């Protein structure tokens, strides 16, 4: 290293030292936000990721059994030591009322395990000494089944792929991963549906929103102001209120059907509510401002003189629009579409109220698994799938159009 | 100067955080009771909460929820149980009791368990009311309405859409009952794959005419808007719609009964106060008082004598209504719900 280089580094360090108080002040201004983000955003996402693979139940409730199962080859018949260890674990579990947690966890993989585990726990509570094996078999012959013990042994691991596999309609069987049978496969279908509806809504908001944004830029000030108010007004109304309003409009005895039949456009009332059509209509309405605003802000920055210049140079109107104007609006279009698409992926209340059973999206299932079934592992796994898909789409957009081409406002 | 500014900002943000946290600390003097809101909680307020405060001086701090066990579990896991008593439905009782989310009930301080209708006492919960899921129709539009559970599946006799709860529970039972399975064999049948197939096959016969509802209030709304000809519904919701001038009628045939329970969440700060409140809330006269406001049957046999005759005719537990009925087996659904619900979801999407 030459003396000049050393000097240069010294100067650089001195400058940085001199800037330190300013940097600290800046950081301390941002500190509340950083703390807030860490608590309200980063921590829950980490928790979500851990919950999606966490598997504490079997390890905590059956430590002795798992030790006794360590040497099991998975084929031979199990003997008394394993059952004795199992009985001891269940006695402790009964005391601490953790048997149900184990039962619920195992019930995900074998239906009926919940009550089998609870019944076994109740039984061992009354037994003082062994032999236990015959007692268990007397209670339920399935306590001899290879599959049961295989699943218990497999769940001795701290992490499980079970929830992630289930969220992708896959299962582990005999050491290999395969698709679950037809009537149990729901999540890929739901994910495809979510992407499809979000895509459709994005397309419609673009078709409807693009001309509106254009008119907003060329209209006289007073009219543009009024139009802007019309665009923004729905945004200031609660989402639930707007959704309920659509329920009123779309129902069989609703205003839309009243008008259609009064005009004799349809002979019988249309089924609009509880359908995909209704869901897409309501979501498109709710998402419109999110698509319009970024497009509008980009359009405003395009000088109107350019179109006139193109025309005066001999371009026909359509060619002037498509070759001069439209390409310049692309950053706004991409930003608006991206925003609407990603927001639509997470829709919950609108499909729940306006949609039918075939229109429920991933979020609806997440809510059911969290609130009703208390299956937080599966809910977290579905959340991870949604998060990964959203990030993948975002990155894909970035790759396709470039980060500098997306202009969110 | 700059350092002082940094310090001040730090202090300010700490104070803000502290304020945020202290906001969650609650006053301790009142008893915090959580129930399902709506007309049900209003009935409890008039028949139980207000008179309890008048008699004991203990204030009731009312909370509402939608029956999400997740809410109770999250509260307990956070280590700060702020609610003293909760009204839960039967699946929540079963799950919460198994998982140790609720305190054990000292029945000696509540009353004799044999006074409760069979199946409405538990080591963690005290039964309070019985409600029914039954068929309802609009008497104004259908003067000669359905009479039996079979009519729910008879599209020829009663054309039009059917409202059903978007949940396999109750629907698979109704399907089997309408298919001729006696109530006492319904769960035996459903425990076999063939039985589940049979129930889905029966539902298939009306699948394209079904409108699914999720929240209890939607069922009467579907009837009112004419969206459906008949719907399954919780009987209290139908009664409330009638109070607002409707003429909805309930078919008391093969209705499915289920109960609600008072429980004490684990770690409740004032366990004696909670227990005293529950004891009061299930006293025969108090229980019978609820029927003045909402037609949910009292779970205590000794309460029947205090129910006024004009209220008794609306109760699912009254002898004239309780001819053929099925009690929902929540243990069955806890065991088999995961698998059947997935099948139900794929069936819906087909």
Image (cartoon, coloured by chain):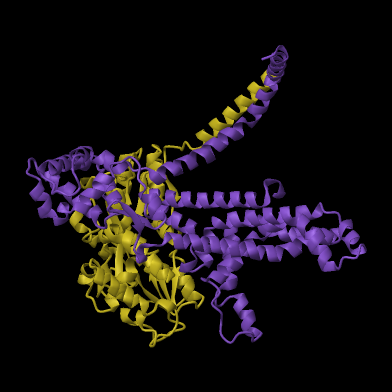
Chain colours: A purple, B yellow
* Image spot of residue B159 (x, y percent): 43, 85
* Image spot of residue A260 (x, y percent): 63, 81
Looking at the image, can residue A400 be seen? yes
* Image spot of residue A64 (x, y percent): 20, 37
Is residue A187 left or right of A207 when viewed as pictured? left
Is residue B126 left or right of A392 when viewed as pictured? left
Decide: is B195 above or below A199. Answer: below
Quarter location, residue A303: bottom right
Looking at the image, can residue B31 be seen? no
Is residue B5 left or right of A222 when viewed as pictured? left
Is residue B116 left or right of B48 when viewed as pictured? left
Quarter location, residue B349: bottom left
Decide: is A35 above or below A202. Answer: above
Instruction: Name the outermost residue toward the right.
Output: A312
Quarter location, residue A130: top left
* Image spot of residue B23 (x, y percent): 52, 36
Residue in front for this viewpoint, B162 or B266: B162
The quadrant the N terminus of chain A occupies is top right
Instruction: Name the outermost residue toward the top.
Output: A3
Q: How many numbered marks have been drawn onto this rendered protein structure?
A: 0
**Residue sitting at x 82%, y 59%:** A324
**Residue sitting at x 36%, y 63%:** A184
Instruction: Name the outermost residue toward the front.
Output: A2
Decide: is B5 above or below B64. Answer: above
């Amino acid at each position: 290293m030459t003396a000049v280089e050393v000097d240069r580094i010294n100067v650089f360090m001195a400058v940085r030292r001199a800037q330190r108080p300013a940097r600290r002040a800046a950081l301390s201004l941002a500190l509340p936000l950083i703390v807030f983000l860490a608590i309200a955003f980063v921590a829950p996402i980490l928790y979500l990721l851990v919950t999606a693979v966490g598997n504490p139940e079997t390890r905590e409730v059956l430590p002795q059994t798992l030790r006794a199962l360590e040497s099991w080859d998975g084929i031979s018949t199990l003997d008394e030591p394993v059952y004795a260890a199992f009985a001891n674990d269940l006695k402790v579990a009964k005391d601490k009322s953790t048997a149900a947690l184990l039962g619920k966890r195992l019930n995900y993989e074998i239906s009926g395990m919940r009550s089998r585990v609870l019944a076994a726990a109740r039984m061992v509570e009354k037994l003082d000494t062994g032999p236990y094996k015959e007692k268990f078999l007397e209670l339920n012959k399935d306590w001899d089944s290879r599959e049961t013990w295989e699943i218990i042994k497999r769940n001795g691991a701290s992490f499980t792929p079970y929830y992630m596999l289930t969220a992708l309609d896959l299962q582990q069987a005999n050491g290999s991963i395969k698709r679950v049978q037809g009537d149990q496969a729901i999540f890929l279908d739901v994910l495809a549906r979510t992407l499809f509806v979000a895509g459709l809504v994005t397309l419609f908001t673009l078709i409807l929103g693009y001309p509106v944004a254009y008119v907003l830029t060329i209209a006289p000030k007073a009219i543009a102001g009024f139009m802007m108010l019309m665009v923004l007004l729905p945004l200031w109304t609660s989402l639930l209120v707007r959704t309920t309003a659509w329920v009123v409009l779309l129902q069989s005895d609703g205003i839309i059907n009243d008008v259609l039949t009064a005009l004799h456009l349809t002979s019988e009332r249309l089924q609009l509510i509880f359908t995909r059509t209704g869901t897409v209509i309501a979501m498109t309405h709710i998402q419109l401002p999110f698509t319009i605003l970024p497009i509008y802000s980009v359009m405003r920055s395009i000088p109107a003189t350019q179109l006139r210049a193109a025309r005066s140079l001999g371009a026909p109107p359509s060619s002037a629009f498509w070759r001069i104007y439209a390409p310049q609006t692309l950053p706004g279009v991409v930003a608006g579409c991206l925003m609407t698409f990603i927001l639509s992926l997470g829709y919950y209340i609108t499909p729940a109220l306006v949609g039918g059973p075939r229109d429920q999206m991933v979020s609806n299932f997440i809510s059911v698994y969290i609130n009703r079934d208390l299956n937080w592992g599966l809910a977290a796994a579905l959340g991870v799938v949604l998060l990964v898909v959203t990030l993948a789409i975002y990155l894909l957009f970035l790759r396709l159009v470039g980060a500098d081409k997306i202009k969110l406002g | 100067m700059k350092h002082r500014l940094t310090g001040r900002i730090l202090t300010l943000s700490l104070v803000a955080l502290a304020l945020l946290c202290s906001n969650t600390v609650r006053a301790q003097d009142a008893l915090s009771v959580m129930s399902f809101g709506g007309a049900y909680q209003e009935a409890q307020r008039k028949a139980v909460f207000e008179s309890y405060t008048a008699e004991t001086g203990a204030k009731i701090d009312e909370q509402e929820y939608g029956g999400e066990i997740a809410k109770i579990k999250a509260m307990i896991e956070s280590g700060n149980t702020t609610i003293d008593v909760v009204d839960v439905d039967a699946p929540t009782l079963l799950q919460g009791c198994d998982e140790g989310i609720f305190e054990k009930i000292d029945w000696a301080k509540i009353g004799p368990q044999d006074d409760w209708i069979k199946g409405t006492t538990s080591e963690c919960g005290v039964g309070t009311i019985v409600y029914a899921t039954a068929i309802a129709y609009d008497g104004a539009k259908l003067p000669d309405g359905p009479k039996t559970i079979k009519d729910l599946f008879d599209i020829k006799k009663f054309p039009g859409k059917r409202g059903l709860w978007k949940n396999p529970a109750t629907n698979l039972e109704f399907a089997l009952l309408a298919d001729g399975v006696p109530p006492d064999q319904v769960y035996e049948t459903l425990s076999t794959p063939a039985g589940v197939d049979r129930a889905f096959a029966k539902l298939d016969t009306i699948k394209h005419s079904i409108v699914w509802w999720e929240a209890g209030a939607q069922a009467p709304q579907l009837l009112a808007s004419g969206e459906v000809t008949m719907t399954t519904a919780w009987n209290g919701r139908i009664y409330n719609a009638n109070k607002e001038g409707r003429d909805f009628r309930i078919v008391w045939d093969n209705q499915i009964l289920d109960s609600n329970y008072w429980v004490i969440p684990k770690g409740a700060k004032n366990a004696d106060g909670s227990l005293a409140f529950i004891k009061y809330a299930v006293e025969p006269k108090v229980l019978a008082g609820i029927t003045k406001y909402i037609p949910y049957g009292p779970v205590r046999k000794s309460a029947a004598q205090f129910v006024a005759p004009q209220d008794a005719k609306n109760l699912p537990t009254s002898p004239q209504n309780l001819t053929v009925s099925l009690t929902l087996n929540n243990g069955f659904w806890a065991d088999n719900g995961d698998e059947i619900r997935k099948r139900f979801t794929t069936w819906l999407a087909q």
